[in-house]
Amino acid sequence: MSGPSDKPRLGPNGRPMRPFVMRQSLTGKLRVWRYLILRRVTQVSVLLLFFGTVHWGWSIAGLPLLSGNLSAAELLQSVPLADPFAVLQIIVTQHLPEARVVIGAAIVLAIYAFLGGRVWCAWVCPINMVTDLAGWLRRRLGIREAAHLNRNIRYIVLVLALVLSVLMGVAAFEWISPISMFHRELIFGIGLGWTAVLGVFLFDLFILRHGWCGHACPLGAFYAVAGRVAQIRVGFDKATCTHCGECAKVCPEPQVLHLNKAAKAGMIASGECTNCGRCIPVCPEASLDFDWRWHIKAGRGKQTENRELEPPERRAA
């Protein structure tokens, strides 16, 4: 006989909570891993574009495909690209960069602000592959956190980087950035890239879960500010959600999954969301999916309009 404890837990909508179950077929697993695979393809492709241009002479119509590095680059010697946070650090030192560099920073900032701000962190940054590996090993080995830090520390680090830039007269974070060092090491084979990578890896593995990306990186904090106006968002369907918590288990920024706020907005609106897509395939009710901000708002507006036209007794239900 089954007792009361055998009854499934019910969500706020009265539907039973279901756990996420990994599919057994290869097709099913690939579907669950689809955003992870796409992120890795994107990250490796960006590195290959830089590496191929430097070492293999990749070009189009005789123009280098992608020259430079993640701080400042040129696409086909025509489109300037620059790290907007690095440029901001230079500007506060009262050294005005060349107009071409400022334009490149504006282009990159506009792209990431449109796509999702911290989409940089999950889809482009090479350090993300290192921290994801540390996170995977942490789960496999059952390693517990040795410290707890407030995630807002990254904003303090961001301000500190700007203050130090003013005092030192150079872009302070660029001198110690593990992202820049790792990228230079991979592309040009110089610098202390592997030392920086090892430090980040050990920090995330033994000290703090999502320690670097989730708590300390000022570049992530910078893009989180830009991400507040992002047009590509993770849409949220309150009607189907049972609050099972499966999304929070895999999210590198679980604080963004404030479902009451998400229900009001119809999406995960926080700029701190990396748009990594981890939460989407593990949701048993398919309550989460990528969507356009304007489409989400239009859909909510239409639902509200239809709700107001319903009879009072049905609206109350």
Image (tube, rainbow, N blue to C red):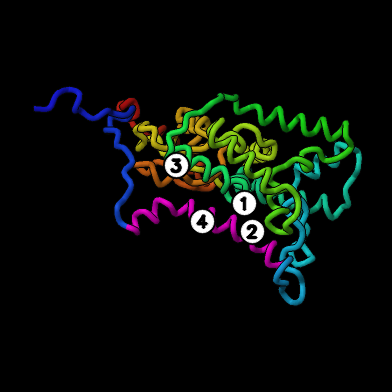
Cα distance in 3D space between marks 4 and 2: 12 Å
| Front residue of 11 and 45 | 45
* Residue 132 placement, left or right of 191: left
- Decide: few, some or many residues near mark 4? Use Cα within 10 Å; few <14, some 14-19, many ≥20: some
Where's residue 69, x and y in %?
A: 74, 55
In the structure shown, which secondary structural element does the residue marked by tag 1 occupy?
loop
* Residue 220 placement, left or right of 104: left
* Residue 88 placement, left or right of 143: right
Quadrant where the C terminus sits is: top left
- Decide: few, some or many residues near mark 3? Use Cα within 10 Å; few <14, some 14-19, many ≥20: many
Cα distance in 3D space between marks 2 and 1: 7 Å
Where's residue 145, x and y in %?
A: 51, 28
Callout 4 amino acid:
Leu
Q: Return the residue at label 1.
A: 124
Question: Seen from this angle, which residue lies furthest left?
Answer: 1
- Decide: few, some or many residues near mark 1? Use Cα within 10 Å; few <14, some 14-19, many ≥20: many
Residue at 61 percent across and 49 percent down: it is 115
Magenta segment: 26-53
Q: Return the residue at label 4.
A: 38
- Contact between marks 2 and 1 (CB within 8 A): the answer is yes
| Front residue of 218 and 230 | 218
Residue at 50 percent across and 43 percent down: it is 234
| Front residue of 257 and 260 | 257
Q: Return the residue at label 2.
A: 46
Numbered label attached to residue 279: 3
Q: Quadrant of residue 211?
A: top right
Callout 2 amino acid:
Val
Cα distance in 3D space between marks 3 and 4: 15 Å
